Amino acid sequence: MDLPSGYSPNTQGNMVCKLNKALYGLKQSPRAWFGRFTQVMLNLGYRSSQGDHTLFIHHSAAGGVTVLIVYVDDIVVTGNDEEGRRKLRDYLIHEFDIKELCQLKYFLSIEVAHSRAGIFISQQKYIVDLLKGTGLLGCKATAIPIEPNHKLGEFLEEKAVDKGSYQRLVGKLIYLAHT
């Protein structure tokens, strides 16, 4: 950080600059932004979820529900309270520099399909991409994961397994199992 104009370096070492505003790009800027966002949501009457602090819920007097979730720089708003969603959108546009995009189609590896019958979610695209990425798209299912009486050992003639790709695959499978 450079000193503001009009200040000279202090030779005695007893003066410091106080940062009054979080700047974009600093390590603490996402925390400062989310703190301000949380305060705005609480002032609007939303409650933060106990299970996920990025999930905010509002129950209207008419019985409607508006739900908002934040992930990095994406905000998803849903619920059965049309008026509550409109008011929230207008207030967020006033408070923050946001851009409203189209209807939700894909979020955190979950496909969202809208129809007259309702909203349907699927992870088919994530699974197909995972299988393509590992070269297992054409593999066949089996009831037994390994042949019976198979002896595990070191095969010198086989090429070594890439540890990094194996770890990524396990991480993706864990994510798939939990979502």
Image: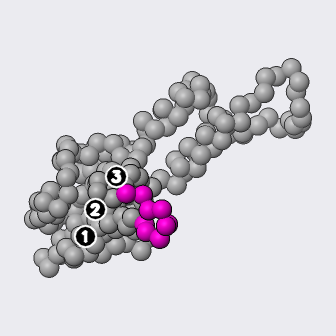
- Residue drawn where x is 32% and y is 66% of the image: 20
Q: Please tell me which residue is depicted at 82% across the width and 22% down the height of the picture.
A: 158
Label ID, residue 41? 1
Asked whether the beta carbons under mark 3 and mark 1 sit within 8 Å of each other, the answer is: no
Residue 50 in view (yes/no) = yes
- SS at badge 3: loop
Q: Nearer the viewer, mark 2 or mark 1?
A: 1
Could you tell me if the residues under marks 2 and 1 are in contact, i.e. CB atoms within 8 Å?
Answer: yes
The quarter of the displayed image where residue 7 is located: bottom left
Observer-nearest of 90 and 109? 90
Relative horizontal placement of residue 126, taking residue 77 as reference (left or right): right
| Mark 3 vs 1, N-terminal side | 3
Q: Where is mark 3, residue-wise?
A: 24
Q: Secondary structure at mark 2?
A: strand
Question: Can residue 89 be spotted in the picture?
Answer: no
Nearer the observer, 65 or 117: 65
Tell me the CA gap for discs 2 and 3: 23 Å
Per the image, is 12 magenta? yes
Residues in magenta?
A: 8-16
Marks 3 and 1, Cα distance to the nearest angstrom?
A: 21 Å
Q: Position of residue 143 (x, y in %)?
A: 67, 39
Q: Nearer the viewer, mark 2 or mark 3?
A: 3
- Label 1 secondary element: helix
State the residue position of label 2: 68
Q: Amino acid at mark 3?
A: Tyr
